Image: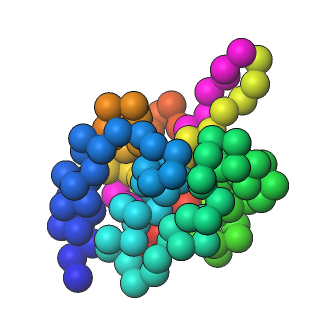
Amino acid sequence: MNRYKELENSIKKYLNTPFDWETHNCGLAACSIASSYTDKDWAAPFLKHCSSPLSAMRMIKKRGGFRGIMKDLGLKPVSKNEASRGDAILYEWDHKGRTREGLGIVVDFRAAFAGPDGLTLIPITRCSQAWRVE
């Protein structure tokens, strides 16, 4: 399996898929993309917890945010500067005084995140933490 070819195919597949809490939220999108070039179904442990925005946010909070989820999955943290194509990466932003998180996949100098109109590309320099996906 060619990791980079599978990553490219998966990005193309999800490019225009809009954000949906049950099937294509940022965590599920990143896990589905990562599953395309590894031998693991990264999304399986989370699918039953994503039936609504509230259930997804509760699950993320209960597990310590995406940092806790990545730790539970056994992924090794790396700095965003060490991240390579196909690694998982965290984007954090302020929304009305609260920190929000999004999980994405590194594609080049940017990372792809599930967005309202399909995948949104955000520069890695704006992200905070990455994890090696092998």
Q: Is residue 98 left or right of residue 49?
A: right
Question: Is residue 63 positioned above or below 54 on the image?
Answer: below
Left or right: 103 with respect to 38?
right
The residue sitting at the front extreme is 51
Camera-side residue: 115 or 72? 115
Near-viewer residue (90 or 20): 20
Q: Main secondary structure of the magenta part?
A: strand
- Quadrant housing the N terminus: bottom left
Residue 115 in the image: above or below residue 33: above
Give the magenta part as a residue range: 85-96
Q: Is residue 83 visible?
A: no
Q: How is the image coloured?
A: rainbow
- Residue 91 inside the magenta-drawn segment: yes
- Residue 23 appears at what percent x and percent y? 45, 54
Residue 5 seen in the current view: yes
Tell me where residue 134 appears, x and y as whole percent. Answer: 45, 76
Residue 125 in the image: above or below residue 47: above
Instruction: Report the residue at 70% width, 70% height from top.
Output: 72
Name the side, left or right, on which 55 lies relative to 17: right
Residue drawn where x is 53% and y is 73% of the image? 44
